């Protein structure tokens, strides 16, 4: 599975960004997709994830009510999105798209996209 992110950038606090991730390859094997982030000097954090059919979503507490994860399927491609509203400086991080093809965890990672939120 190959993952390609887009949509990062710089925004002022209170603004919005939408991240996109296109999955290709063995997408029929994907059971869940999500977004991790890593800020400088901090541990990697699972921000949000969603099941392949979109039935179940989960968010880390700090983004609940501000971020929305969605998933779409077109033929053999899957796309996952992260709509981020009311952004805060503490949301600044590199955001990674991830995919799981079994129940052993997120074994497929994108290259990451930078999000910078200025105060």
Image (tube, rainbow, N blue to C red):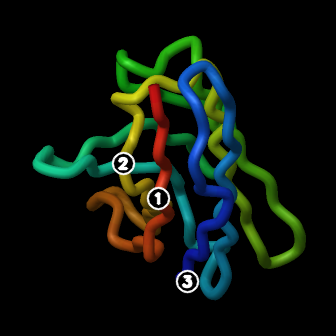
Marks 1,3: beta carbons within 8 A? no
Residue positioned most to the top: 65
- Left or right side of 54 for 13: left
Residue positioned most to the bottom: 25
Determine whether the residue tagged by mark 2 lies in a helix, strand or loop.
Answer: strand
The one of 77 and 10 positioned closer to us in this rendering: 10
- Left or right side of 29 for 94: left
From the viewer's perspective, is the residue at label 1 or at label 3 nearer? 1
Look at 44% across and 67% down and name the residue there: 112
Look at 44% across and 54% down and name the residue there: 95
Say which residue label 2 marks. Answer: 93
Mark 3 or 2, nearer chain start: 3
Marks 1,2: beta carbons within 8 A? yes
Q: CA distance from mark 3 to mark 2?
A: 22 Å
Mark 3 surroundings within 10 Å by alpha-carbon count, few (fewer than 14), some (14 through 19), many (20 or more): some
Q: Which mark is residue 28?
A: none
Q: Quadrant of the C terminus?
A: top left
Q: Which mark is residue 2?
A: 3
Mark 1 or 3, nearer chain start: 3
Q: Quadrant of residue 17?
A: top right
Q: CA distance from mark 1 to mark 3?
A: 19 Å
- Left or right side of 116 for 71: right
Say which residue label 1 marks. Answer: 114
Marks 3,2: beta carbons within 8 A? no
Look at 63% across and 37% down and name the residue there: 69
In the rendered view, would you say 31 is above or below 112?
above
Determine whether the residue tagged by mark 1 lies in a helix, strand or loop.
Answer: strand
The one of 28 and 6 positioned closer to us in this rendering: 6
């Amino acid at each position: 599975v190959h993952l390609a992110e887009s949509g990062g950038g710089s925004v002022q606090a209170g603004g919005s960004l939408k991240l996109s991730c296109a999955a290709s390859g063995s997408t029929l094997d994907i059971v869940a997709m999500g977004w991790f982030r890593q800020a400088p000097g901090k541990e990697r954090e699972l921000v949000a994830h969603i099941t392949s059919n979109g039935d179940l979503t989960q968010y880390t507490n700090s983004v609940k009510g501000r971020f929305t994860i969605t998933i779409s399927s077109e033929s053999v491609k899957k796309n996952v999105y992260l709509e981020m509203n009311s952004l805060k400086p503490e949301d600044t991080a590199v955001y990674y798209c991830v995919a799981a093809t079994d129940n052993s965890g997120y074994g497929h990672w994108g290259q990451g996209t930078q999000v910078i939120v200025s105060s």
